[in-house]
Amino acid sequence: MLTIFGPSNRYCDGVSRRGFLKIGALGIGAGGLTLADIFRAEARAGATSRPKSVINIFLGGGPPHQDMWDIKTEAPKEIRGEFKPIATTVPGLQIGEVFPQIAARMDKFAVIRSVVGATGGHDAYQCTSGWPHKSLSNIGGRPSIGSVAAKVLGPVDPSVPPFVGLARSTQHRPWGDCGGPGFLGPAYIAFKPDGPGMADLALHGMTLDQLADRRRLMTAFDGMRRELDASGTVTGIDANVDRAFGVLTSSKLLQALDLSKESEKVRQRYGDGKPYHYQFDGAPTVNDQLLMARRLVEVGVRCVTLTYGRWDSHGKNFDLVRDHGSKLDQGLSALVEDLDVRGMLNDVTVIAWGEFGRTPRINKNAGRDHWPQVSCAILAGGGMRTGQAIGATNRLGEYAKERPVHFQEIFATLYHNLGLDPAQATITDPTGRPHHLVELPVIRELV
């Protein structure tokens, strides 16, 4: 959250002290980690890369694979459930009946019916990093893909954060996780524009001239630091401060977050996901955030994460899927069509998935319980070979019968689509040890 406080005071050096600027937990001008510090850290990573992006849609709670992309028509009723498969634009490829708009654009999508490797955690960690919680936990854990992109690739535009987390806070907090920086440290956390943070980007009526007062203050402090620092470690500080002020004063980010800039026709195509049903302790069905994600990648954000719905269907599974699924069908199909029409689809990879699947057998409450043995994902864009289904489960949807696809293979593919070679690229932990981004190869069927 950007905060400006304190009256103007003049001291013997003639510089105006008007308080401090903060964005979220990141302070500018006093204590803690500054936004300029973030840019210094990014500068050490080297030059920016081509503008490729990922939109990572987390279906928090564990969506039921056998009621979405892998309908089991040959299974007995107590396993098959209520939904029927429908044909798609890809001959021979069928998906669940609550997704007619995606079915009509199936040539733009690929479904994975055999995702394996889930640890069973009821959280977003594997869907944002590709790793289990315990991996390198002694030094902070593995970073999310957004943090890696911020570290290795840096910003496309100096005034636009490379990693934005749209996930709203949830009562079950792990579902609202947009992905953490792990051992990379707080310099690579996601920018979160929700709540007061977004409003505060408008500076509460402050003018750029008033911001310039703070620039003069910081310049004075920097001058003193240069005199004291004979080692020259502050060389280049002005460039990083300029970038920090660029984010504060640029209109690009604020404009991208303002959905009123879109036509009513476009907003209606995406829908708003309301009314929110079956939310409980999870996320709402935020169709508007799918539109916001498109606007963010359009101005140069490399990774956007969000949490869509609450899919923990221990009861009333089929009612929940009808509600959440039909809304996701509208928003996700609109997003992919929008990216395609704008010529962005090859540069933006879209993925929607959850932390695990659901039990084959329907319980006494017409629900499905946790099933880490296998789950599913749907992807689009990124220059991938779409219009296909990868993998298959057995007749009852219990396990991957054909072509198991591990979480790490999916992340290798996402990194590849960002322009990073998962077999070669490394990131260094605080001890100086390099680590590969993932340990498995890309999904060759897709790339």
Image (cartoon, rainbow, N blue to C red):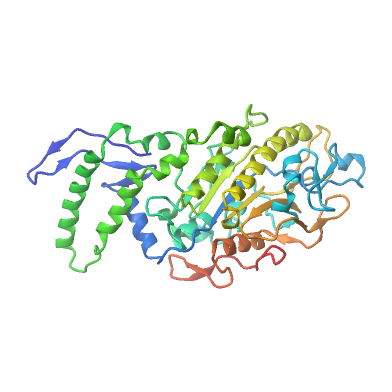
Residue at 46% x, 36% y: name it.
258
The foreground one among 178 and 259 is 259
| Residue at 17% in and 35% down | 8
For residue 18, side relative to residue 69 (left or right): left
User: Height in image: 168 above or below 431?
Assistant: above
Q: Is residue 390 left or right of residue 295?
A: right
Residue 156 location, x and y as percent? 44, 57
| Residue 179 appearing in the image | no
**Residue 400: image location, x then y, percent:** 80, 58
Along the viewing direction, whichever of 60 and 96 lies nearer the viewer: 96
Residue lying furthest left? 12
Residue at figure coordinates x 41%, y 40% from the top left: 254
- Rendered image quadrant of residue 441: bottom right
**Residue 226 percent across, percent down from the top left:** 17, 61
Task: Give the residue displayed 64% in from the left and 62% down from the top.
Answer: 408
- Is residue 12 visible in the rendered structure shown here? yes
* 243 over 366 or under it: above or below: below
Residue 109 shown left or right of residue 13 in the figure: right
